[in-house]
């Protein structure tokens, strides 16, 4: 049985007797603080979002079904769903339980049940309880945790939300039935992530484009899912973040073409050239670049680079359009343009390439 963490986020973590807290309402959005390379769809995750992303990589991803590639796929898709729903901004996401009623959406207590036919969203996966049957979730529990009884899985779910084994709340969760039992199986994050990916994210958002998948009405949805193209890009970004974190890295290393908001997001160099953030006029985000004459450095596994003329003079590196960047769609706001090589004082031959650039 895996060890479950208690009081997952010690700063601001809720007491066990209190209701789940709403999403953070920091008026500034907080999207530029924290580690600079946690960039998703051109936006840097705030400190709390980064903490939950690390939690997914360390505690959730290893329990998901399939090989590492499949685990990453499930984790990145459901993490995107939860991120755009605002759940990564809560202090105790596994405890989260939000019920829709005739008077609107409101958090409910850990042992409360949402009304029949009402939307009921729970856990770090932000998964809808009514969309899943008890038999489906019991089968998932057996698949993901074959060495545990269902009662142990539920006790682990309670512990993940901060309720100690043997406490009255934990005991009631273990003894729960019906919809409440479903909700707590889903609050075991690996179960919730797996169920949400197959029943909600894929059919509703990836295969379909249902209204609640994308939009600009909420801050987190505007940042991570304003439209389907941006959402798919965000999922790719999250996969890269989780892959780095789960492989023992701290954060993905930025390079030419990495989304950025400031020079601090581009902490790399090549020779005497230091990375910088190129932001187009009137924009708030851009991509990492290097000053160049004739040639730009390449890295294995990254998009090929190309030196073009900079509007302010001299040359700057960008990336060539290609499959690794999905013909520039992975770089928000850019389009494919045929541009000439900036030669400067170099002896490089004249050339033209299709690159990612701002219109």
Image (spheres, rainbow, N blue to C red):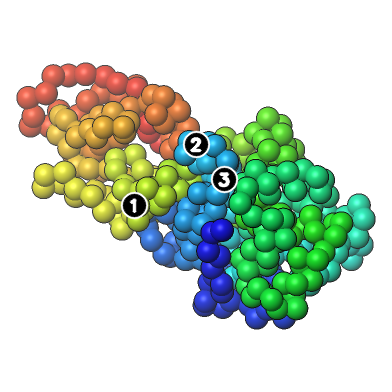
Q: Which picture quadrant has residue 208?
A: top right
Location of residue 84 in the rendering, given as x and y in whole percent from the top left corner: 62, 52
Instruction: Report the mark closest to the observer, 1 or 2.
Output: 2
Q: Residues within 10 Å of mark 1 (few under 14, many from 20)?
A: few
Q: What secondary structure is marked by label 2? A: loop
Q: Image height check: is 236 above or below 147?
A: above
Distance (Cα) linking label 1 and label 2: 19 Å
Distance (Cα) linking label 3 and label 1: 20 Å
Identity of the residue drawn at 19% across and 42% down: 291
Location of residue 302 in the rendering, given as x and y in whole percent from the top left corner: 31, 33
Q: What secondary structure is marked by label 3? A: loop
Residue that numbered label 1 is attached to: 249
| Dots 3, 1 in contact, CB < 8 A | no
Judging depth in this view, the residue of 149 and 63 nearest the camera is 149
Q: Is residue 193 left or right of residue 354?
A: right
Judging depth in this view, the residue of 184 and 290 nearest the camera is 184
Location of residue 270 in the rendering, given as x and y in whole percent from the top left corner: 16, 44
Residue that numbered label 2 is attached to: 67
Q: Is residue 317 left or right of residue 103?
A: left
**Reading the chain from its start, which is encountered first: label 1 or label 2?**
2
Q: Residues within 10 Å of mark 3 (few under 14, many from 20)?
A: many
Q: Which picture quadrant has residue 338?
A: top left
Residue 277 appears in the figure: no
Q: Is residue 38 left or right of residue 163?
A: left
Image quarter (top left, top right, bottom left or bottom right) of the C terminus: top left
Q: Residues within 10 Å of mark 2 (few under 14, many from 20)?
A: few
Residue 170 appears in the figure: yes
Q: Which mark is residue 64?
A: 3
Identity of the residue drawn at 72% across and 60% down: 151
Image quarter (top left, top right, bottom left or bottom right) of the N terminus: bottom right
**Reading the chain from its start, which is encountered first: label 3 or label 1?**
3
């Amino acid at each position: 049985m895996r060890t479950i963490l208690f009081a997952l986020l010690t700063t601001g973590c809720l007491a066990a007797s209190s209701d789940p807290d709403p999403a953070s309402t920091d008026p500034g959005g907080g999207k530029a603080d924290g580690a600079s390379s946690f960039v998703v769809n051109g936006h840097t995750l705030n400190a709390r979002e980064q903490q939950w992303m690390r939690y997914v990589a360390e505690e959730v991803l290893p329990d998901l079904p399939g090989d590492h590639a499949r685990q990453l796929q499930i984790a990145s898709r459901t993490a995107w769903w939860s991120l755009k729903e605002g759940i990564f901004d809560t202090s105790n996401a596994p405890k989260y339980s939000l019920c829709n009623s005739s008077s609107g959406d409101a958090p409910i207590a850990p042992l409360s049940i949402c009304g029949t036919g009402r939307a009921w969203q729970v856990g770090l996966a932000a998964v809808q309880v009514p969309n899943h049957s008890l038999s489906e979730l019991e089968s998932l529990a057996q698949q993901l945790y074959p060495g545990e009884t269902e009662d142990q899985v539920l006790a682990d779910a309670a512990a993940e939300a901060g309720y100690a084994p043997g406490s009255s709340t934990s005991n009631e969760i273990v003894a729960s039935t019906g919809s409440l039992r479903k909700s707590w199986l889903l609050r075991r994050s690996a179960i919730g992530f797996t169920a949400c990916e197959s029943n909600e994210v894929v059919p509703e958002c990836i295969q379909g484009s249902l209204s609640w998948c994308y939009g600009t009405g909420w801050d987190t949805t505007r940042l991570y899912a304003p439209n389907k193209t941006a959402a798919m890009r965000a999922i790719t970004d999250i996969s890269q973040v989780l892959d780095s974190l789960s492989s023992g890295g701290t954060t993905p290393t930025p390079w030419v073409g990495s989304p950025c908001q400031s020079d601090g997001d581009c902490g790399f160099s090549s020779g005497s050239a230091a990375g910088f953030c190129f932001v187009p006029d009137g924009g708030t985000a851009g991509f990492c670049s290097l000053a160049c004459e004739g040639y730009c450095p390449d890295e294995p596994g990254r998009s090929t680079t190309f030196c073009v003329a900079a509007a302010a003079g001299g040359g700057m590196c960008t990336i060539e359009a290609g499959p690794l960047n999905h013909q520039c769609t992975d770089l928000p706001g850019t389009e494919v343009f045929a541009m000439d090589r900036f030669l400067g004082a170099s002896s490089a031959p004249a050339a033209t390439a299709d690159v990612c650039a701002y219109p």
